[in-house]
Image (spheres, helix red, strand yellow):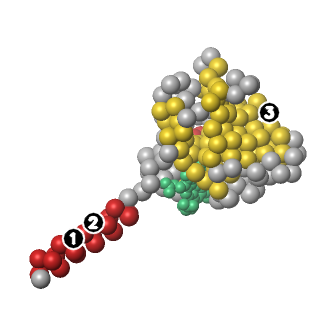
Amino acid sequence: MKVKTLVLSLIAVALILAGCQKTPAPTMQSVVNAKGYREASLIGMKLQWKFDGQDLEIVLTAPTTGWVAIGFDPSTMMKDANFILAYVKDGQVSAIDQYGSQLTNHSPDTTLGGTDDVTAVSGSDDGNTTEVTLRIPANSGDKYDHALAPGEEHTVLLAYGPKDDFETQHTARGKLKLIL
Ligand code: HEM
């Protein structure tokens, strides 16, 4: 009887531990679209990207009038990710290069002693959808960025928020693995 109880207890503990395992990020197969960008979608947000010379060009489209963002290669949650956030206000695109300084927080690379490595190419906000085109160096050399290359698998975070700022928490966020 005691052995049966012990076995049942061990099975219960194993099931609880299995339930605590984090679901791994799905690996998404990207397709090349008519504009020559690779494309993937998550949380209602569209990511398009292409390598161009030394740069990676990124187009982010999300159902928001606030900020849109991408993050690369966190260690845990948001920590250690290279974040690029942008919003469009009065027709002007503002973009910033940040780093996951904590599990659920990030800081501008420049306040950490790094460099701001993002160029806003264009953007629009039609009152429902925000779309921005951004360029980042594929390998900036800044320790608060991660080197990226075509054909490599990277963990990618996508998120969008409700306001034109770089502070307000996301309306939606997600994680996936992509072959760039
Ligand atoms: C703008 C300010 C931001 C704030 C205040 C913020 C705050 C938080 C907080 C409190 C959590 C934990 C609660 C939760 O799971 O929702 C979280 C999780 C998360 N955030 Fe953010 N966040 C911000 C920006 C971003 C950005 C720019 C991205 C990606 C581009 C992002 C991606 C994520 C992801 C993927 C998680 C879940 C991590 C996991 O459970 O593994 N966040 N964030």
Instruction: Quadrant for residue 20, please give it.
Output: bottom left
Residue 118 in sight in this render = no
Q: Are marks 1 and 3 in contact (CB under 8 Å)?
A: no
Amino acid type, callout 2: Ala
Image location (x, y in percent) of residue 108 = 60, 45
Marked residue nearer the N-terminal end (3 or 2): 2
Observer-nearest residue: 126 or 31? 31
Residue carrying label 2: 14
Amino acid type, callout 3: Ser
Q: Residue 112: give its label.
A: none
Observer-nearest residue: 89 or 179? 179
Q: Residue 122: give its label.
A: 3
The crowding category of the residue bearing disc 3, from other C-alpha atoms within 10 Å (few below 14, some 14 to 19, many at least 20), is: some
Which is more foreground, mark 1 or mark 3? 1
Image location (x, y in percent) of residue 119 = 70, 31
Amino acid type, callout 1: Leu
Residue sitting at x 31%, y 67%: 15
- Does 176 sit left or right of 65 as displayed? left
Q: Does ligand 1 reach within 8 Å of label 2's beta carbon?
A: no
Q: Are marks 1 and 2 in contact (CB under 8 Å)?
A: yes
Q: Residue furthest top?
A: 53
Disc 3 from disc 2: Cα separation:
52 Å
Image quarter where the C terminus lies is top right
Disc 1 from disc 3: Cα separation:
58 Å
Residue carrying label 1: 10
Residue sitting at x 38%, y 64%: 19
Residue sitting at x 63%, y 38%: 40
The crowding category of the residue bearing disc 1, from other C-alpha atoms within 10 Å (few below 14, some 14 to 19, many at least 20), is: few
Image location (x, y in percent) of residue 131 = 77, 41
Image location (x, y in percent) of residue 115 = 59, 34
